[in-house]
Amino acid sequence: MREKPITFDDIQKLSARYRISLDQFLHLQSSAIIFTGRLDQASASFIDDYLNNMLQQFEFMRGFEHKHIYFVPNDIAPFMYFQFPELAAFTFFYYMKSLLNLDHMRDLKFSVKNINEAQVKLGKKVQESFNHIPSTEIWGADTIDSLLRHIAFYRDTHVFETKADIFCVYDKLEELVNHIEKQAEAGFKFTYGEPNANSAAPFKLYFNDLISGDNCVHAEIGDKRITYINHNLINFMYTRDEPFNQYTSETFQNAIRKSTQISLVGEKARTRFFNMLRKKIQLQREAVNHYCSPLSFNMIQDEQKCKTGRMSPGCHAGLAAPGAHAKKD
């Protein structure tokens, strides 16, 4: 068979087909670092696309015998919310209204009583997939501050439909914090309310009051490593570049050495840390009456019902359907 010389066009096609950089293909040493990613578009399908992409990444990792995620969050990752879908509903409402600026969201108010069962089901698949992957996380004192600011802003600008909706989001955030504390105490992940899961993955949690997280995720999968970088608030890109991943791994290990482990051990430090998070939520909750008095809230009695899970239909496991509530004139 007659051999055909490879052309630059052929090299470009091979690089695109197998998603490797030209430097990697030719074994060149350069300062270029190649990242792969996608830009989520401002569209009504944003939530479904976001969840499916996240599920695809986790399922890919689960396919390897050796797998481990290292995470330094700037705020609580959205995939942790799915066992408390009201939080996921609020987060995605915030994404679409305040970050993506979707036109149909402009005059809408947020309520937890309108749910999208398909998104609830998909979100739980994402959470379950994540729970099967061992992880190490480094949290700081400000890890929940971003979410608290979002809630406070919508509270103060009257974007919530009812006062009960505000209390429900605060209560579910506190339940999530309590759940993560129990996971840290046990040293493994489990579905909310099911601490004896047979398929639980190890969970290590560290506290560091000097490091400010950047939502960087470093994953070990098989004998390879991938680093995911959050950018433009809601998007992420990743690289398999080995020098970059080696540098990232060393940075994580250095941060771990300078942090306090609060999973399995360090009961006193763990209790103090999570009490601090709960105190922040409580202070925000106490401000609701002051800021919400001008609104026509008529569901005050549901505040306590939400805490006990008896609130209906305003607080139950579901994602808010975007566009369900228009602002009243």
Image (spheres, rainbow, N blue to C red):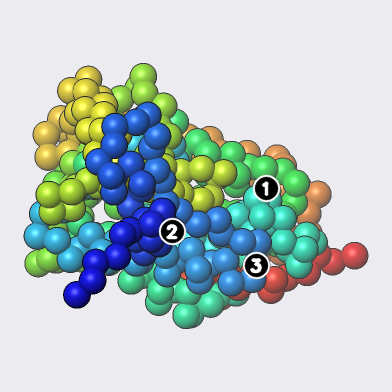
Q: In this view, does 65 lie above or below 242?
A: below
The residue under label 1 is which amino acid type?
Answer: Arg
Question: Mark 1: few, some, or many residues within 10 Å (few <14, many ≥20)?
Answer: many
| Along the viewing direction, whichever of 128 and 270 lies nearer the viewer | 128
Question: Mark 2: few, some, or many residues within 10 Å (few <14, many ≥20)?
Answer: few
**The disc label shown at residue 319, or none:** none
Residue linked to disc 3 = 43
| Along the viewing direction, whichever of 209 and 133 lies nearer the viewer | 133
| Along the viewing direction, whichever of 282 and 148 lies nearer the viewer | 148
Mark closer to the observer (1, 3) = 3
Residue linked to disc 2 = 9
Instruction: Provide the secondary structure element on which disc 2 rests.
Output: helix
The residue under label 3 is which amino acid type?
Answer: Ser
**The disc label shown at residue 155, or none:** 1
Along the polypeptide, which appears first: circle 2 or circle 1? Answer: 2
The residue under label 2 is which amino acid type?
Answer: Asp
Q: In this view, does 319 lie above or below 173?
A: below
Please tell me in which quadrant of the rendered image residue 56 appears.
Answer: bottom left
Q: Where is residue 6 in the image (x, y as percent from the top left)?
A: 33, 58
User: Residue shown at 67%/43% (left/top)?
Assistant: 153
Q: Is residue 155 above or below residue 52?
A: above
Visible residue check, residue 300: no
Mark closer to the observer (2, 3) = 2
Along the polypeptide, which appears first: circle 1 or circle 3? Answer: 3
Instruction: Provide the secondary structure element on which disc 3 rests.
Output: loop
**Residue found farthest to the bottom:** 118
Q: Distance between the residues labelled 2 and 3?
A: 35 Å
